[in-house]
Amino acid sequence: MKRKCAILVALILICGIVAVSAQSVAAGKKYVLKFNHVLTTQDPYHAAFLKWAEAVSARTDGNLKIEVFPSAQLGVEEDILEQIRQGSNVGQNTDSARLGQYVPGIAVMNAPYFVESLEEVQKLNTLPTVLAWKAELEKTQGFKILSFMWVQGFRQMITNKPIRKPADLAGLRICTPPAPIWQESIRAIGATPVAMAYGEMYSGLQTRAIDGVELSFTATASGKFQEVTKFASETKHILLINFEVISSKWFNALPLEYQKILEEECNKAGLEVSKRYLEEIDPRNLSTLKAAGMTIIPSSEIDMAAFRAAGEKAYQKLNLLSVRDQVYKELGKTK
């Protein structure tokens, strides 16, 4: 009996040593994530992505490196998303509108007037419905959502005429991403949606191929759209929630400790820049637009009730009313 116990103890010790050794080998292995986004290097999110990369590198002793590529250097967003699904070591800053093409329900998070504060966004991450969407994206579509705590402010109407009510958008061609929820949201509140790559929007306004864009004040200023438009109307029609996504296959191949670090630091960097965006950065860039000669139509001069009512058509068109109502029930929010 004593001999058997001694052998058992020895086996346990050997297994422990092997496990520790295996973990050490895994920890010593080098991993590289190539992270793509469409924003310029002047945008606050670029600096936040770099900060995320620095924090991850520091906590993994340089064994997990994030290389950040601004201005869509790795390619257009839709192509990167497909590479992610195939298991490539790439990541993308995206939104629920595009992810809704894979799991339809999640698109509701980019619908008109869905949520209106960072606090509500944080609560979303605890809801059963949202957690189920994340799990489905990971298991069936190959997407790992690291974080959606990246809130890029409110989308506003940037045009060459003042916008005070939905009827003012009639006949205007407004550039918006090609995903259905974006297109239907802009159509619902009165405009004609036009899909165009971010890098083509400035020239599109110059040549009058489009009549306006819908962007945050910060994205408007960093893209210098004040040079080719006259009015910024504070419609606040969408609170832009960004999603940082990578391949679930690639993520699950990382050591567990690295997985935790990658998510923790992504959430941390996102919340930090989001708070700054809403409280400091966007208001500062609003002043920049004013100083450049743009006329700002504040929300107090806009028929917000009419815009909210118009936005309902997007939910109806895409059969998202019941989805929204379920999320609101879990969130404890009324319409």
Image: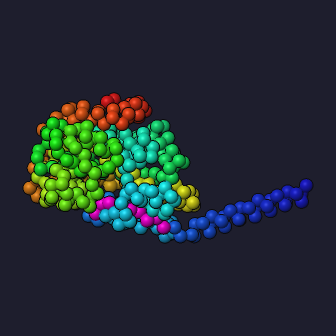
In which quadrant of the rendered image does the C terminus lie? top left
User: Which residue appears at 37% of the width and 31% of the height?
Assistant: 321
User: Which residue appears at 35% of the width and 54% of the height?
Assistant: 272
**Which is more toward the observer, 307 or 23?**
307
Left or right: 129 as drawn, with respect to 2: left
**Which is more toward the observer, 160 or 283?**
160
> Is 121 above or below relative to 18?
above
**Which is more toward the observer, 172 or 95?**
172
In which quadrant of the rendered image does the N terminus lie? bottom right
The answer to whether one can see residue 43 in this image is no
Instruction: Quadrant for residue 226, please give it.
Output: bottom left
Residue 15: percent from left, percent from top: 74, 61
Q: Which residues are magenta?
A: 32-40
Left or right: 197 as drawn, with respect to 172: right
User: Which residue appears at 39% of the width and 56% of the height?
Assistant: 78
> Is 168 above or below relative to 246?
above
Residue 286: percent from left, percent from top: 17, 52
Count numbered badges in the picture: 0
Left or right: 105 as drawn, with respect to 169: right
> Is 267 above or below relative to 322?
below
Residue 87: percent from left, percent from top: 51, 59
Instruction: Quadrant for residue 45, please give it.
Output: bottom left
The answer to whether one can see residue 171 in this image is yes
Residue 100: percent from left, percent from top: 41, 45
Does the stretch in magenta take in 152?
Answer: no
**Which is more toward the observer, 85 or 66?**
85
Q: How is the image coloured?
A: rainbow
> Is 215 above or below relative to 35?
above
Instruction: Quadrant for residue 219, please give it.
Output: bottom left
User: Which residue appears at 27% of the width and 35% of the height?
Assistant: 311
